[in-house]
Amino acid sequence: MEFATVLSLLDATIRLSTPLLLACLAGLYSERSGVFDIGLEGKMLMAAFAAGAVAAVTGSAWAGLLAALIVSIMTASLQGAAAISLKGNQLIAGVAINMLAAGLTTFLGQQWFRQGGRTPQLSADGRFGTVELPFAPQIGQIPVVGPIYQELISGHYILVYVAFLAVPITAYVLYRTRFGLRLRAVGENPKAVDTAGISVNRLRYQAVLITGLLCGFAGAYFSIAQGSGFGNNMTAGKGFIALAALIFAKWKPVPAMFTCLLFGFLDALQIRLQGAELGGIEIPVQAIQALPYVLTVVLLAGFIGKAVGPKAGGVPYTKER
Amino acid sequence: MSALRPLPRWADVVLLPLLNLLLAFVVSGLVVLMIGQNPLVAMQAIVVGAFGNGFNIGYTLYYATNFVFTGLAVAVAAHAGLFNIGGNGQAYIAGLGVATVALALDQTHWLIVAPLAFLAAAFMGGLWAFIPGWLQAKRGSHVVITTIMFNFIASAIMVYMLNRVFKPANIMGPESRTFAEGGRLPKLGEFFGPFQHTPVNLSIFVALVALVAVYVLIWHTKFGYALRTLGFNPTASRYAGISNSKTIMITMTLSGALAGMVALNEVMGVQNRLVLDFVADAGFVGIAVALMGRNHPIGIGLAALLFGALYQGGNELQYVVPGLTREMVVIIQALVILFTGAMEGLFRPGLQRTLMLLSPEQKAEAVARGTVKSES
């Protein structure tokens, strides 16, 4: 392959892994605190719709982003209320959130905009433009390194940088702050945390709200950065790939980034490989599409390494009386 | 407040689900109100659309057939403490079995094809659930995550199979050829006039038999006992000499086989060919049905009928109240799952308190306790 082809493939990889990364880190906070979250997809979908709708009405991408964050955090709170305060089944809460999002976004979209569930096409102001990093044109003149900086690192939507910045921030928060220590502890042994006089439920709510925040960014990325407007079921299972990535990365932030890049790369490859051949045999696109899920199943089964989640995950905490 | 008594059985089984359903309807009604429509008119349109005449009832029963299968699939797994979220994938893969049998033998008679298609659906659906079950039992991977992944793997496989294997050269879309007469399950409309031109077919009897069979299996067989013991307490069942891993694998296989019956209804009974996405999320509706029906066959039968009615009524809704699309039903369904499955804590304590005050001797007790507390 030529250098330019490789570069554009990697460029697509970054674009496609961004929402995965945001959702994956979102799930990381929640699951590390002991709340399983299979509702990432639903929160993203809600956020994508909110962003698309508000950006279409106000014509401002920032207003859209704000709406996405608010709606996603509200959805996360609902899920949190069910899973934490009411001690409901966390998995079922996630299923309900996904289904609610699928129904509500299509329904309200149809009601408000009457375009079959789509939100109107956004103007240039309504969606995020790409960000040119300083000196991109100048550095771009340097051979090899130049194009990498100009094409690959510079010239993405602002949310792409948010996503990749969120990785070191998450790593710092998780491993270097008091909140992070408590967060990890509450996912492993909530009783110990409770005994130390720290509220388990409060910590879990904080984690779930951060999850909502990050899902908001991920959702907004779909409708007002990558796309220009919301479409039915726009997130198309990306929330579940993010969940797979989270497991694949063993609930750790930096491996999460690499896993999301890998899954994003597979996605980019799959788009490019339509009908391509490898050694005379045509590779079915579906095989590449299914690869992230297959890899996750294999990893989870312990055939290549072992993924063990937070010990207290999935169990609502009840104080003994 | 001292410990509350557990709810009496009738309240747990009937009152609580009905309260949660009512809440789901009220919240959906608010959504309808929010967009400026009358929820009562919508409600009436759904009821008429679902039960208004034979045609509507036929469609309602057709949807209900699917939901009985997926509801039972979720329930059987739930009794063993497993959450099978992969009904969609299992039903989808089962379509391969049904279509293969029907395509191969559709020159014979449906009486020959149907039993074989039944077995093929059970085998393929069961296989697609056995693998996650095996992985949970032997390798300790969480069955929820694995079944989610298997849903996506199933849809990739099906897209491939439909495009490359089942699609004849003369058809544009990704679908198999239409089965000949011998590969189709007879529709009830052929025997019963009012159901004419509706998709409800003989597989509804398979659903009825499945309801009874699951009841017998869970409450009246040795295996059912092992299954429930595993669900109540895995440690206890291991000490009782039950092989937990064997129970998990058999349960998941049964669960997948039940979900696979959706393919019998859809592929052999209705579509008469293999098409993309014939499952149409019936697997997820099964979760709502099992929750609503409290994992009991009688409850599941009623809940499946309710959701069948909601689906069919939801289809008719848009013709009566312009703008109210069938997504309304998805919202109701999500709320039912949310309230009955994840937010039980909303009503249970209040209900326990209320019922305690209603029965005389318990009331006296509660009052006595209250006085002690205020004095101390």
Image (cartoon, grey):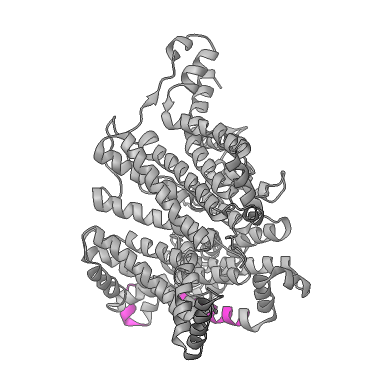
In this orientation, which residue lies closer to the viewer: B58 or B17?
B17
User: Magenta span: helix, strand or loop, mainly?
Assistant: helix
Quadrant placement of the N terminus of chain A:
top right
In this orientation, which residue lies closer to the viewer: A51 or A14?
A51
Place of residue B288 in the rendered image (x, y in percent of width and height, measured from the top left): 46, 67
Name which quarter of the figure residue A98 lies in.
bottom left
Quadrant placement of the C terminus of chain A:
bottom right
The extreme front residue here reads B375
Which residue shows up at 43% across the image and 56% down it? A78
- In the picture provided, is A42 more to the left or to the right than A204? left
The extreme bottom residue here reads B360
In this orientation, which residue lies closer to the viewer: B283 or B226?
B226
Place of residue A217 in the rendered image (x, y in percent of width and height, measured from the top left): 43, 39
In the image, the segment drawn in magenta is: B192-217
- In the picture provided, is B130 more to the left or to the right than B101? right
Place of residue A298 in the rendered image (x, y in percent of width and height, measured from the top left): 67, 48
Place of residue A51 in the rendered image (x, y in percent of width and height, measured from the top left): 34, 41
**Membership of B196 in magenta stretch:** yes
Residue A193 in view (yes/no):
yes
In this orientation, which residue lies closer to the viewer: B348 or A307?
B348
